[in-house]
């Protein structure tokens, strides 16, 4: 193990932080899948009650949650019993990645951490709702059909994040979990 002068962190500490982040991402990905697949009848479609979306608040506390929710979404969409195909697998995962990244940015720049729930609502509403209108269409696709699909996905996401996500955010902030989650990032260890 190599140590830098003046008490700066060792290579071993950086490796430990990186390992913690990878493990946490894996746990989040697994949780995402476990919280999605048993509720498949509600998790896929224009009204998406995807319980795993409560994990969308985790990037508020740690960047290590971003790959976790993204990979979890990718796996859940790959295992989707409705088989919506590559469009859902690629663009659903991309929507999750964008939303998680924006959540992290908002959390780092705002005193009001709860604002971090807005990107998953908007991004999933626009991207997922937009393509679901075409994948699940029964008849003519009009602007109104697309807008209703977007609004439906956004509303589903909003209900989940407001009813379950905000209370989880509060519990994390009022317990030692916040410190635990914040220590997962290697940047936190560099202080």
Image (cartoon, rainbow, N blue to C red):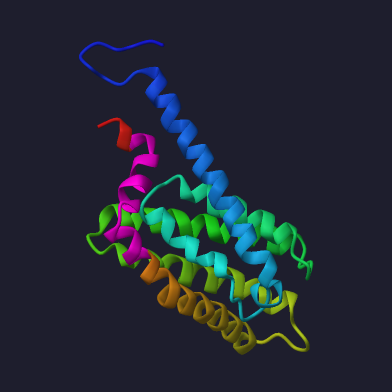
The residue sitting at 61% across, 52% down in the picture is: 30
Image spot of residue 11 (x, y percent):
39, 18
Q: Is residue 126 magenta?
A: no
In the picture shown, does residue 187 fall above or below 37?
Answer: above
Q: Is residue 173 magenta?
A: yes
Image spot of residue 121 (x, y percent):
47, 72
In the picture shown, does residue 23 fall above or below 35?
Answer: above
User: What secondary structure predominates along the stretch shown in magenta?
Assistant: helix
Side of 105 where 124 appears, left or right: right
Q: Nearer the viewer, residue 107 or 129?
A: 107
Side of 148 where 122 appears, left or right: left
- Point out the stretch of residues depicted in magenta: 169-187
Q: Quadrant of the C terminus?
A: top left
Q: Quadrant of the N terminus?
A: top left
In the picture shown, does residue 176 fall above or below 159?
Answer: above
The residue sitting at 44% across, 53% down in the picture is: 101
In the image as oriented, which residue stretches furthest toward the front?
A: 175
Image spot of residue 33 (x, y percent):
64, 58
The residue sitting at 29% across, 30% down in the picture is: 190
Q: Nearer the viewer, residue 51 or 108?
A: 51
Q: Quadrant of residue 2?
A: top left
Image spot of residue 21 (x, y percent):
47, 39
Q: Nearer the viewer, residue 152 or 137?
A: 152
Q: How many numbered markers are drawn?
A: 0
Side of 81 where 32 appears, left or right: left
Q: Quadrant of residue 52?
A: bottom right
The residue sitting at 52% across, 38% down in the picture is: 22
In the picture shown, does residue 95 fall above or below 28?
Answer: below
């Amino acid at each position: 193990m190599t140590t830098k002068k003046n008490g700066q962190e060792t290579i071993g500490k950086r490796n430990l932080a990186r390992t913690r982040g990878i493990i946490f991402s894996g746990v989040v990905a697994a949780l995402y899948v476990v919280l999605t697949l048993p509720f498949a009848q509600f998790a896929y479609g224009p009204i998406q009650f995807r319980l795993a979306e409560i994990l969308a608040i985790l990037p508020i506390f740690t960047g290590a949650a971003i790959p976790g929710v993204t990979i979890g979404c990718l796996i859940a969409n790959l295992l989707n019993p409705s088989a919506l195909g590559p469009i859902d697998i690629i663009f659903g995962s991309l929507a999750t990645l964008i939303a998680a990244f924006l959540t992290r940015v908002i959390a780092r720049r705002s005193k009001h951490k709860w604002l971090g729930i807005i990107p998953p609502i908007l991004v999933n509403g626009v991207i997922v709702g937009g393509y679901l209108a075409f994948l699940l269409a029964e008849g003519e696709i009009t602007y109104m059909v697309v807008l209703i699909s977007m609004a439906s996905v956004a509303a589903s996401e909003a209900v989940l994040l407001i009813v379950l996500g905000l209370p989880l955010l509060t519990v994390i902030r009022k317990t030692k979990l916040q410190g635990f989650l914040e220590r997962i990032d290697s940047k936190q260890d560099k202080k």
